[in-house]
Every structure is written in C-alpha cells, then in structure tokens.
Image (cartoon, rainbow, N blue to C red):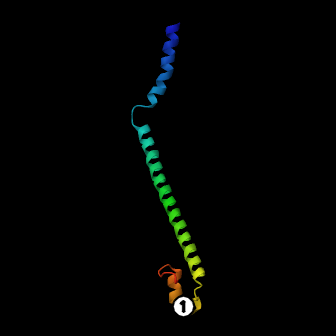
Amino acid sequence: MKSTIAILGVLALLPLAACDKGKGDDALAANITEAADNRADMIDNQAEMMKDQADQIRDNAENRADAVDDADVNANAMTPAQREAIINNTAPVPQ
C-alpha cells in the first residue's frame, strides 16, 4: 500500500516535471525583464539628471534676476538686442 501511494505520488509529479524540458525559456524570460529594468533605470537616471539641470537653470535665472534688480539697471536705456542677450543668458548682467 505504501509503495502504491509513493508510485502514485511520483506519477502525479511527472506532468509538472515534463513542463520544463530545459528549453531555456525561463532564463530568456528573466533576461527580457532584467534588460528592460536596466533600460528603465537608465531612463530614470537621465530624467533625474535633466531635472537637476532644470533646477540649476531656474536657480541661475533667479540669481541673475536678483542681480539686475539689485544693480538697479536702466533697462530702458538698453537696446532690444542687449536686453535679449541678458534674458537669454548670453551676456553678463550689468553691474
């Protein structure tokens, strides 16, 4: 009786063992998700760096605006090209 139960138990597990015939599909699937995770992490890192750059641009603009205000610059005496250059960060802020 015990040997019959043991044989039935082994026979019940055979279909499960037959499912994975060593085709490498599990490893391939794992490699797909790992590669996708790596690409997604890289994009996340690039996005974080771009956010940091955007913050630096905003901080720089705030500092330049404060410097213009503190210097009490006469913007009306400037040419439109001079004002554009200051706005676009291609010219130094007048002192």
36 relative to 90, above or below:
above
Q: Position of residue 63 (x, y in %)?
A: 56, 73
68 relative to 11, above or below:
below
Q: Which residue reaches farthest left?
A: 23
Q: Residue at x 56, y 78 (%)?
A: 67
Nearest the viewer among 78 and 42 is 78
Q: Position of residue 13 (x, y in %)?
A: 49, 22
Q: Position of residue 28 (x, y in %)?
A: 41, 41
Tally of numbered discs:
1
Nearest the viewer among 37 and 65 is 65
Q: Position of residue 49 (x, y in %)?
A: 49, 61
Q: Residue at x 53, y 86 (%)?
A: 83
86 relative to 54, above or below:
below
Circle 1 SS class: loop
78 relative to 44, above or below:
below
Residue at image mark 1: 78
Q: Residue at x 59, y 91 (%)?
A: 76
- Amino acid at circle 1: Met
Q: Which residue reaches farthest top?
A: 1
- Circle 1 packing at 10 Å, graded few (<14), some (14-19), many (20+), is few
Nearest the viewer among 41 and 50 is 50
